[in-house]
Image (spheres, grey):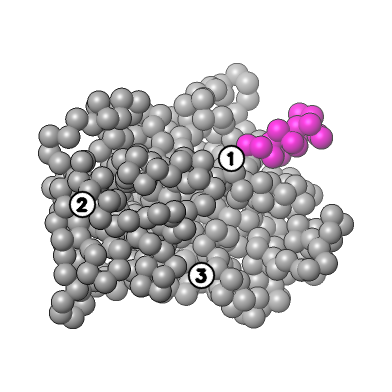
Amino acid sequence: MNLRPTGLHRRKDMAEILPFRALRFNPEIVGKLESVVTQPYDKISPEMQARYYAASPFNIVRVIRGLEEPVDSAENNVYTRAAETLGDWIQSRALVSEGEPALYRYDQEGRWPRGARAVMRRRGFIALVRLEDYSAGIVFPHEETFSGPKADRLELLKATHAHFGQIFVLYSDPEGTIEAALDKDSPATERPWERASDEYGTVHSVWRIQDSSAIESIVEKMRAKKLVIADGHHRYETALAFRGFWRSQHGDDPRADYAMMTFVRMETDCLTILPTHRVLHSLRDFDWEIALAGAREFFEWTPATREGGDWRGRFLNALAELGRMRPALGVYGGSERLGWLALKPAIPLQRLLPDLPPSLARLDTVLLHRLLIERVLAISREAVREEKNLRYVREPDLAFEEVDRGRAQVAFLMNPTPVKEVWGNALAGHVLPQKSTDFYPKLLSGLTAYWLDNPAGI
């Protein structure tokens, strides 16, 4: 089965999706799948890393986020050990390759946000996609990236020649024709090819689709789609950099022209974005009253109180309600220094932020970074990129606790960015600040891998 478009009909402005021979864990060797898969590498804390190491000698963390050692050198380090581990697992058949190229339906089922009553099921599929520069107008980023993670991932890719994590991509399909095709060709009543539960209670199931007509139908439907990266900007940009490196070493060999992605319909009801909160620390001469006075130039201030039980829950619920009416932020400086900042209705954003389109200028994260962090607190964009005075946290309780324990001077609590705002700004070529979105649940690492050195081919 050869689905690679020829020069006669492959258009440069269209997405090229390919089935592939996935590398996957062999349950006869590694045992239960949940003992060897992980959250994405950038969500793995030191505590999670230790837990994954203890879970199995075959856990994928040993490849994607291995332990550093005091004696590490150019010849022996996390990257060389990752390559050795990968080779050992392939040789021992702990990792095995599919015999024929396939697409892989990927369902996630659970209650999210965590604690929700209704069970959600999100459906996507895993495939290779031809890498394109952003300027080609096929793949679109939605937020800025950091340089550090890309350098780290590039070294791992150079060492292993394999993609282990998923790049999470959105496509638009209002009628749901692709999801319907996935369900037809891999019905939920059939036993999944792989299934694992993660530590947050989400069940991940994968079905293999090898029917050539089904694959051709899905590939053809995807050709005209625009693709917006939801999660995995660093992985995508690393893959672009690796493509250039590979070409310098191997010429026209096309294996590095592709990366592994999971495609999810933008219109699904099961797309959840969690907010990423900001905690600021090590600010010289920080004064709460002076900072609050500066913020009031742009925002209306409403103080809150810590009285009564579950004051944090009430605080966040009120922030969500306020955010439905206009851009709003929660602010916590410890003790009774807490409240909400809501953008003044008549604020002249076009004059204040002339370099930004209106669709971007009114987003909470943009206002926080441009008006408060840069103007009021005088923290440079370079300092933000390098995280000199800023940390990002997912859990609101942690943001409060960082201030209470003296590890931060102020915390900004955020509402989630709407999916439509992400999609619209991305297609218009506008990127949000770093960590503006946190799509949930995450796609597991280790379910499938794209191994460039697979002797059977792509």
171, above or below 188, in the image: above
Amino acid, disc 3: Arg
Hey, what amino acid is under mark 2?
A: Leu
Could you tell me which secondary element the residue under label 2 belongs to?
strand
Q: Is residue 342 left or right of residue 77?
A: left
The quadrant the N terminus occupies is: top right
The span from disc 3 to disc 2 (Cα, nearest Å) is: 44 Å
Considering only vertical position in the picture, is 343 above or below 135? below
Q: Quadrant of the C terminus?
A: top right
Tell me the residue at 15%/41% (across/down): 344
Which of pointers 1 and 3 lies earlier in the amino acid sequence?
Answer: 3
Asked if residue 170 lies left or right of residue 330, the reply is: right
Q: Secondary structure at mark 3?
A: strand
Q: Which mark is residue 341?
A: 2
Q: Is residue 20 above or below residue 37?
A: above
Secondary structure of the residue carrying numbered label 1: helix
Q: Residues within 10 Å of mark 2 (few under 14, many from 20)?
A: many
Q: Is residue 109 visible?
A: no
Q: Which mark is residue 195?
A: 3
Q: Amino acid at mark 1?
A: Glu
Q: Position of residue 9 (x, y in %)?
A: 56, 21
Magenta part of the chain: 240-256
The residue closer to the viewer here, 277 or 380, is 380
* Residue named by callout 1: 237
Residue at 47% across, 53% down: 389
- Cβ atoms under marks 1 and 3 closer than 8 Å: no
- The answer to whether the residues at label 3 and label 2 have Cβ atoms under 8 Å apart is no
Mark 1–mark 2 Cα distance, whole angstroms, equals: 35 Å
Q: CA distance from mark 1 to mark 3?
A: 29 Å
138 is within the stretch colored magenta: no
Q: Is residue 434 left or right of residue 417?
A: right
Nearer the observer: mark 1 or 2; the answer is 2
